[in-house]
Image (cartoon, rainbow, N blue to C red):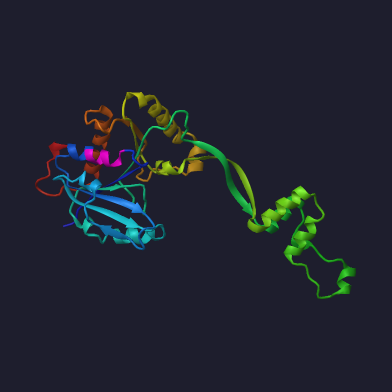
Amino acid sequence: MSFQRAFIRVDGTDNSGKTLLIQQYLKSNRSAWVSVARILETDDVDAPKADYKKTAELERISTDSVFSTMVYRYPPSQRSKAYEEFWDTTFIEEPTDAVFLEGAADFGLAPDLHIFVTRPLAKNESLLRQDEIEIARLDVKGVLEFLTGIKLDEVEMPDDEIEDDENLEFSDDEIIEETITEIPDSIAEVIREAASGGYPLKRKGWFLPDTHQGLKGASMVIINIMDEAETEAARQLSEEIRRMHKEEEIIRDLSLRTTDGRRLTVFIANLANPKDSELKRAVARIKRVIRENSSPHGSEYEENNW
């Protein structure tokens, strides 16, 4: 019998509360059968490897409703292989309603819900950053044509020099050096540098820090606060995240597109407090996605438990 399952990706920054969020979901879960995997992209392995040994972190999420847990590691150069072999693991054979994939690693599995968990940023720290972005790169020949207006293909030897040596030819490099000697040193230096790697054309563009790259695909963001004192910083971060999805220039530069096709929702919640109203809303949304994307696992499935 085949089962339709919901895949929930729980991405986020280090020590932000990813596992804690899964714990809070499991505590409120009454009927869904669940599997949880921690996904790690690491150079510590030479090939994709599934490890079923219980770690301290996996022990935290071991409950009666969790059918299986796994730590799945793969090297950065083998993402495609990791995706293919994931479907052959014992872990995925369990007939569960939902599979939680915890971690920032992305090996190509499209989730039904992509969650990003983060802590508020430090005071006066901004999420969005603007810097020069390269939009094109000219090759050496193109650089010369761009800077001098000279078409290298049209450069010819004078007739009197050809008579001295009929077999003499100028390579592109020789033409470049000959041209450089006839222009100011400042421009010549630019051309010499471009000769090794091309000439970059740049404009101002928007960037995210490496720690928050997962925001590009997330449709559900949870800003985990420890106490009320962090609320203001969390609100500022929330506004920046919403701005990302409103301004066309930022959307273009970051190539924003939620991986699950859903609209953005941002929650500010204390994940350590099961009574937190925003946490309850976030968990309710997770349950709704699981309900919409999974088939009943059997007669024990109770719709009224959701």
Q: Is residue 22 magenta?
A: yes
Residue shown at 32%/24% (left/top)? Answer: 228
Query: Where residue 290 sits in the image (x, y, percent)?
Result: 23, 43
Give the main secondary structure of the magenta stretch: helix
Which quadrant: the C terminus?
top left
Q: Is residue 101 magenta?
A: no
Picture layout, residue 152 above or below residue 236: below
Q: Residue furthest right?
A: 160
Query: Where residue 208 sits in the image (x, y, percent)?
Result: 47, 40
Tell me the quarter of the picture where residue 114 sits. top left
Which quadrant: the N terminus?
bottom left
Residue shown at 70%/58% (left/top)? Answer: 141
Q: Residue furthest front?
A: 56
Picture layout, residue 234 above or below residue 298: above
Q: Residue furthest left?
A: 299
Asked if residue 252 lies left or right of residue 288, the reply is right
Query: Where residue 11 sits in the image (x, y, percent)?
Result: 34, 44
> Which region of the structure is painted magenta?
17-23
Query: Where residue 269 sits in the image (x, y, percent)?
Result: 30, 30
Tell me the quarter of the picture where residue 172 sits. bottom right
Picture layout, residue 201 above or below residue 240: below
